[in-house]
């Protein structure tokens, strides 16, 4: 089934945890996969975002994945870490490094304050 103006809200304990949006998408294999393309973006309730031209949600792995260029933004109290690269698998929370699988090289950049103790 093809879709336009995709908006998929994912819940944890009946609370919205993340939302996938894109220009277009399609449901594959009886709902096991959702392929989203055209400004595909996932935002979590913690403020993390994943952007890519194409993202795939795999229900059995409970993960987002892409072979395209991806940008992951992870804000904290002092700034934001930006991770960019190709080929990534992330859990639904776009979480910690333990939940990140990288198939090709990624680059991380931190923008924010760096505390220097004297």
Image: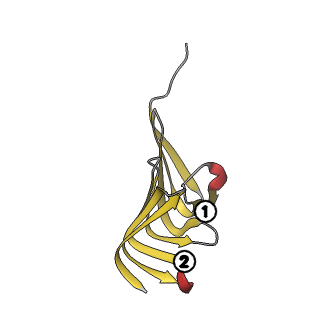
The type of colouring in the image is secondary structure
Mark pair 1, 2: CA separation: 23 Å
Residue 93 at x, y = what percent? 54, 55
Q: In terms of secondary structure, where does tag 2 sit?
A: strand
Question: Which numbered disc covers residue 33?
Answer: 2
Residue 73 at x, y = what percent? 46, 50
Which residue corresponds to the image point at 47% horizontal and 47% vertical from the top-left? Answer: 46
Neighbourhood count class around disc 2 (C-alpha, 10 Å): few under 14, some 14–19, many 20 upward: some
- Looking at the picture, tell me which residue is in the foreground, 73 or 4: 4
Q: Is residue 79 above or below residue 29?
A: above
Residue 40 visible in rendering = no
Which residue corresponds to the image point at 53% horizontal and 69% vertical from the top-left? Answer: 66
Quadrant of the frame with the C terminus: top right
Q: Quadrant of residue 19?
A: bottom left
Depth check, mark 1 against mark 2: the one in front is: 2
- Looking at the picture, tell me which residue is in the foreground, 27 or 113: 27
Residue position marked by numbered label 1 in the rendering: 104
Which residue corresponds to the image point at 48% horizontal and 63% vertical from the top-left? Answer: 10
Question: Which numbered disc covers residue 72?
Answer: none
Badge 1 or badge 2: first in the primary sequence? 2
- Looking at the picture, tell me which residue is in the foreground, 24 or 12: 12
Which residue corresponds to the image point at 53% horizontal and 47% vertical from the top-left? Answer: 108
């Amino acid at each position: 089934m093809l879709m336009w103006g995709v908006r998929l809200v994912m819940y944890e304990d009946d609370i919205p945890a993340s939302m996938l949006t894109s220009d277009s998408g399609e449901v594959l294999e009886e709902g096991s996969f959702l392929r989203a393309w055209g400004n595909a973006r996932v935002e979590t309730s913690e403020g993390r975002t994943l952007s890519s031209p194409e993202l795939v949600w795999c229900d059995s792995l409970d993960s987002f994945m892409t072979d395209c260029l991806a940008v992951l933004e992870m804000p904290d109290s002092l700034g934001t870490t930006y991770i960019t690269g190709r080929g990534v698998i992330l859990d639904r929370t776009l979480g910690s490094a333990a939940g990140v699988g990288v198939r090709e090289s990624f680059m991380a950049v931190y923008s924010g304050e760096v505390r220097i103790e004297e």
